[in-house]
Amino acid sequence: MVAEGLGMMLGPLAVGLVLTVAGPGAAFLAAAGVTLVGAALVGGVSATSLAPRPAASAAPASSAGAGGEPHESPRRRDLLAGVRLIAGHPSGLAVAILIGIRQVAIGALDVLLVIAAIELLRMGDEGAGFLNAALGLGTVVGGAATLGLAGRSRLSPYVLLGAVIWAVFLGATVLLRTPEIAVLLLALAAIGLTV
């Protein structure tokens, strides 16, 4: 939820800044470019690179933490364990960064689709609904396709492919500027986003 919330905040903020400085086309291309950077980060990630490492030394459990303080709550302990796991595994950090980038892109789309429908594609106010529906369709198709990846030991090529699909079709949407093609491209982009 934190990554999603950050994405919902940072995406629209970044889009607003890029829109102010460079316009809607640049905002779409920036979102595509950031996604490609995230894809590059996970290119070498495999399930084995994310496997937990054995502890250096297993200390016996006690009822008090350092300095005689009671143990931290299970939620806090789990959160800290997750942070330590990600920090200790560069591959895990890369995946976490890509997830964050995805969430920023999703947050940015809240703003971008309205602007694209009205200013770039001249679809009118209702155009944002059609563009969102195209994203929904692509998400459904991509989600179904992703089920076939379950259990594979090396997912990074698929994640990389998904990010490239997302970036290429998102960028093409703004470059081609045809409403019917934009709906198709956004559906295809969403398939990549889902992976």
Image (cartoon, rainbow, N blue to C red):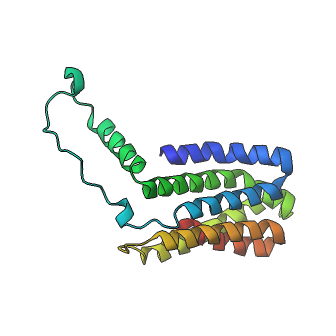
Q: Can residue 125 be seen in this view?
A: no
Of residue 153 and residue 121, the one placed in the foreground of this image is 153
Q: Quadrant of residue 181?
A: bottom right
Q: In this view, does 115 lie above or below 148?
A: above
Of residue 137 and residue 105, the one placed in the foreground of this image is 105
- Furthest-front residue in view? 56
Task: Identify the residue at image location x=73%, y=71%.
Answer: 183
Give x and y (percent) for residue 112: 74, 55
Q: Is residue 39 above or below residue 112?
A: below
Q: Can residue 156 be seen in this view?
A: yes
Task: Identify the residue at image location x=83%, y=64%.
Answer: 123
Give x and y (percent) for residue 31: 70, 57
Give x and y (percent) for residue 30: 74, 56
Task: Identify the residue at image location x=47%, y=46%.
Answer: 1
Task: Identify the residue at image location x=71%, y=66%.
Answer: 170
Q: How many labels does the image show?
A: 0
| Relative side of 189 to 157, left or right | right
Of residue 53 and residue 62, the one placed in the foreground of this image is 53
Give x and y (percent) for residue 50: 37, 60
| Relative side of 88 to 163, left or right | left
